[in-house]
Image: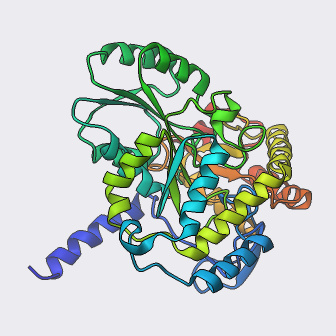
């Protein structure tokens, strides 16, 4: 069958359905490096506008950090552009292993294995370490890449209600006959910005003989006193059996991810994880950049400290202005708008005021939970945040939502 009119029409209908539902995602073109100030073309063909970016995962401002860029240039010059091989054939340079050791030391684990992305790490890890005799018990709000990874694994799968420790305990009791139990969580949940209760989770794991898995993509580098992530924040460093994380967020934001944890589990990934065995090695230029990012973090906590101050300022300011926020103490500050169209209009109006913050709505978040997710960065100076605040207040007034309750907003705009 060729791509005939009937086939094309089927897809066009599907896409029109997405448009009609008001959930079509339109990309904005950035003409500058990723940073607090960016040059954006939106919509396509429109005049390029200077805006403040307050929705990147560039938590530590390292995406365009001069030292990271310099290190990447040097990596390019000394180790070349690409490996043209998977790791186990002829794709492992000394710097690949060096980065694995640096991550191990930073996270306080036993060993680490790199993947092309954290999505790949999550896609490979479960299948590599579990069998049909085991059970995966995951928090109901874990990241999509974890859900896909669990789908690729033959172990039984069950869930526990988000951060509900009583429910988790029941599930652990229910599966005591399994060979192995593993509790699967995000460290920080990216949509709401809340952190997993890892101290309690580790206690339950010890009581019911289970392993603990944490995806710390939204935490590595800045959560915890020295930025070691949620295990540090919760006082359980060294007690998490499997940590996955990304280099595509706080750690320079290029790409790459890893599995870090018990040495036997890491070795199982090296032998068996399909995205590791069948996908190209990370490019040397990126390895060199990530190594520099870790070097910067190992020298001082200045960046994560500045991020913490920025996040506190922003959270207080928005709250005082009368917005409804999701509670939390991470640099993810979701501004709740509930209605999908309102979230889109709000984002559009912010853009006109010089602030880039994307609206989130179903299916990225639950229906009726639409929001603008703001994310702070150590790259933000106070003047960025003050200007962004002015824009939020102006647009909030325009839509008449300041000081309003959730019910009042829903009454005005519907769900
Ligand atoms: C961003 C993210 C990922 C994906 O990371 P990539 O390296 O971009 O593939 C995985 N898990 C979580 C929790 C994330 O937030």
* Quarter holding residue 85: bottom left
Q: Is residue 34 above or below residue 126?
A: below
Give whichever of 58, 155 is nearer the camera: 155
Residue 89 at x, y percent in the picture? 35, 71
Visible residue check, residue 163: yes
Residue drawn at point x = 31 percent, y = 15 percent: 176
Residue depicted at x 44% and y 15%: 169
Image spot of residue 324 (x, y percent): 70, 37
How many tags in the picture? 0
Residue 377 shows up from this direction? no
Q: Which part of the image, by quadrant, shows the N terminus?
A: bottom left
User: Relative to 13, is 303 on the left or the right?
Assistant: right
Q: Position of residue 288 (x, y in %)?
A: 64, 71
Viewed as shown, does residue 38 lie left or right of 179? Answer: right
Q: Residue furthest right?
A: 383
In x, y percent, where is residue 24? 45, 64
Colour pattern: rainbow
Q: Which residue is found at the position 64% from the left and 36% from the top?
A: 230
Residue at the left extreme, as displayed: 1
> Which quarter of the figure has residue 345?
bottom right
Depth check: give the residue in front, 413 or 141.
141
Q: Is residue 56 left or right of residue 362?
A: right
Give the residue displayed 23% in from the left and 40% down from the top. 154
Examine the rendered structure and indicate whether residue 185 appears above or below residue 281: above
């Amino acid at each position: 069958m060729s791509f005939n009119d009937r086939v094309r029409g089927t897809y066009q209908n599907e896409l029109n359905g997405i448009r009609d539902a008001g959930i079509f995602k339109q990309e904005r073109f950035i003409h500058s490096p990723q940073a607090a100030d960016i040059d954006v073309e939106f919509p396509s063909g429109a005049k390029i506008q200077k805006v403040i970016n307050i929705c990147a995962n560039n938590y530590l401002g390292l995406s365009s950090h001069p030292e990271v860029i310099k290190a990447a240039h040097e990596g390019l010059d000394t180790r070349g552009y690409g490996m043209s091989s998977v790791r186990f054939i002829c794709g492992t340079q000394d710097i690949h292993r060096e980065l694995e050791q640096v991550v191990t030391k930073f996270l306080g684990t036993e060993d680490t294995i790199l993947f092309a992305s954290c999505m790949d790490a999550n896609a490979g890890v479960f299948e590599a370490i579990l069998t049909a005799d085991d059970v995966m018990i995951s928090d109901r709000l874990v990241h999509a890449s974890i859900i896909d990874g669990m789908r690729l694994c033959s172990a039984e799968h069950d869930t526990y209600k988000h951060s509900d420790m009583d429910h988790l305990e029941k599930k652990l009791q229910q599966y005591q006959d399994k060979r192995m139990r593993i509790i699967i969580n995000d460290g920080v949940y990216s949509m709401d910005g809340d952190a997993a209760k890892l101290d309690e989770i580790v206690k339950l794991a010890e009581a019911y003989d289970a392993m603990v898995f944490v995806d710390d993509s939204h935490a590595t580098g800045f959560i915890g006193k020295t930025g070691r992530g949620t295990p540090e924040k919760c006082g359980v460093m060294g007690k998490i059996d499997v940590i996955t994380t990304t280099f595509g967020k706080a750690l320079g934001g290029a790409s790459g991810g890893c599995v870090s944890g018990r040495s036997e589990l890491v070795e199982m990934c090296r032998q068996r994880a399909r995205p590791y065995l069948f996908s190209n090695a990370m490019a040397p230029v990126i390895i060199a950049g990530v190594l520099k990012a870790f070097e910067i973090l190992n020298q001082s906590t200045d960046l994560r400290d500045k991020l913490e101050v920025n996040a506190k300022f922003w959270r207080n300011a928005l709250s005082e202005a009368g917005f409804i926020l999701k509670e939390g103490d991470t640099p993810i500050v979701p501004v709740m708008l509930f209605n999908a169209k309102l979230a889109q209009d709000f984002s559009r109006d912010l853009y006109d005021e010089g602030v880039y913050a994307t609206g989130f709505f179903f299916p990225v978040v639950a229906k009726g939970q639409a929001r603008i997710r703001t994310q702070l960065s150590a790259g933000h100076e106070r003047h960025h945040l003050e200007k962004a605040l002015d824009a939020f207040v102006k647009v909030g007034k325009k839509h008449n939502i300041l000081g309003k309750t959730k019910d009042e907003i829903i009454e005005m705009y519907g769900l």
